[in-house]
Amino acid sequence: IQRPATNLDPPFHVGCQTPILNTTERANAAMVMLARNTDVDGAIDSIRSVQNQFNQHFGYPWVFLNDKDWSPEFVSRVGKVVKETGGGEAVFEKIPTYMWGYPPWIDQDRARKEMESMQNRRIAYAGKESYHHMCRFNSGFFFDHPALLKYKWYWRVEPDIEITCALTYDPFVEMERNDKRYGYTVALWELGKTVPTLFHKLSDWKNKRKMPSTSLWTAMMAPAWLPWPFRKILRLLRNRDGNGDMWNMCHFWSNFEIADMTFFRSQEYREFFQFLDEDGGFYYERWGDAPVHSLAAGLLLRPDQVHHFSDLGYVHKPFQYCTFAPHEDAFKRGELVPDFDANDVREATEKEIGCNCFCDPNIDQVAPEC
Ligand code: GDP
Ligand code: MN
């Protein structure tokens, strides 16, 4: 299987738009944050960043989701910040219990045993029951939350992130105009041990349904030219199916997403989620919403329906995505940037493709494509 030279599409706009392209229509969209009451400080940091870089000029509403009742502190502090930073309505919503928690067919004793064993194998967050519920909610339910039903588009914002470029146009409107369904900033390697059987499950499903491979699916498969040790490691992870396809474990980092919820609300996606959910891997393994969304996009979307926001710098520790030129070379080679040098960035600033971007030399940089 030959991987395309690059899967990246060009940004909607390059550089700063002056005046800001905010005089036209608005999309049917919301800024969405899932958070805990204890995330309040990180939530405020994220909101300030997103409002400052983008939403102060556009005024999209914010929807905050929590499996618990919101604390008065969260509501008042966050509400105040949204108002002060250029607004958009803010609503604070609770997640219905059927969207968060074990479904009846899960053997909870087995789930807890598996979680403990994963914890002992140092699989991040795997010992935390709530993290599994969160991944399942983000995989199969958020788009059906009553507070989101009236919206088509969402921008997922997590606490403790930073947007490091100004966004001087409306990403929702541009995605709609350009027939995009799913947008990301960073793609990363998944840890095989979190999803040992996910790929096989999916592949079975794909074959049973006689679904053709899209070229995005193909691009997510390990390329034939990958050096042997890597192929061997991937094989050991058993991520190879009956067609010889092998998932390269690359996935969109879903803590940032701008996407069309009608994709997730489609019959196909629902069946896909249900198939995975019935298997139990959200609990017996630690399937994350990132590989689930990514493999669904690979199966169900055309490559040209996926957009890379290459012009939008982003920080979610421990990684950041920078929009500068040295990085472009690295992502064309499909490599991570090994040694990040602040001087490279300074020299390359003129070639910046975003607007007023900032790149923090102290945070590890990743290429947008793995
Ligand atoms: P990471 O990004 O994988 O390191 O995990 P995070 O701790 O950032 O969690 C991912 C997202 O889920 C963030 O938006 C968190 O606020 C949210 N989250 C995680 N666990 C819970 C939980 O138990 N309850 C709620 N309401 N949100 C959670
Ligand atoms: Mn996070």
Image (tube, helix red, strand yellow):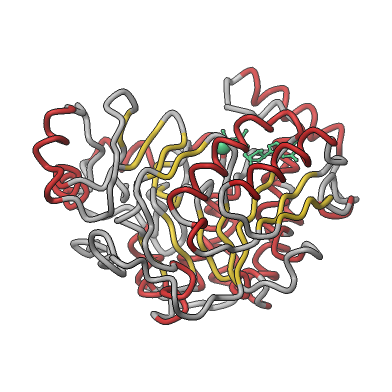
Q: Quadrant of residue 310?
A: bottom left
The one nearer the camera, 327 or 155, is 155
Indicate which quadrant contains ligand 1: top right
Q: Quadrant of residue 171?
A: bottom left
As drawn, the residue found furthest toward the top would be 120
The one nearer the camera, 247 or 187, is 187
Image location of residue 127, percent across then percent down: 70, 26
Image location of residue 259, percent across then percent down: 53, 65
282 vs 318, left or right, is right
Task: Give me the residue at 72% from left, 45% from top.
Answer: 79
369 vs 99, left or right, is left
Rendered position, 198 above or below 152: above
Image location of residue 43, percent across then percent down: 62, 37
Task: Give me the residue at 44% from left, 76% from top.
Answer: 23
Image location of residue 285, percent across then percent down: 66, 38
As drawn, the residue found furthest toward the left would be 347
Task: Give me the residue at 51% from left, 61% from top.
Answer: 258
Where is the N terminus found, in terms of image quarters? bottom left
310 vs 277, left or right, is left
189 vs 201, left or right, is left
The one nearer the camera, 265 or 226, is 265
* Label tally: 0
The one nearer the camera, 188 or 153, is 153
Rendered position, 123 above or below 136: above
Rendered position, 347 above or below 277: above
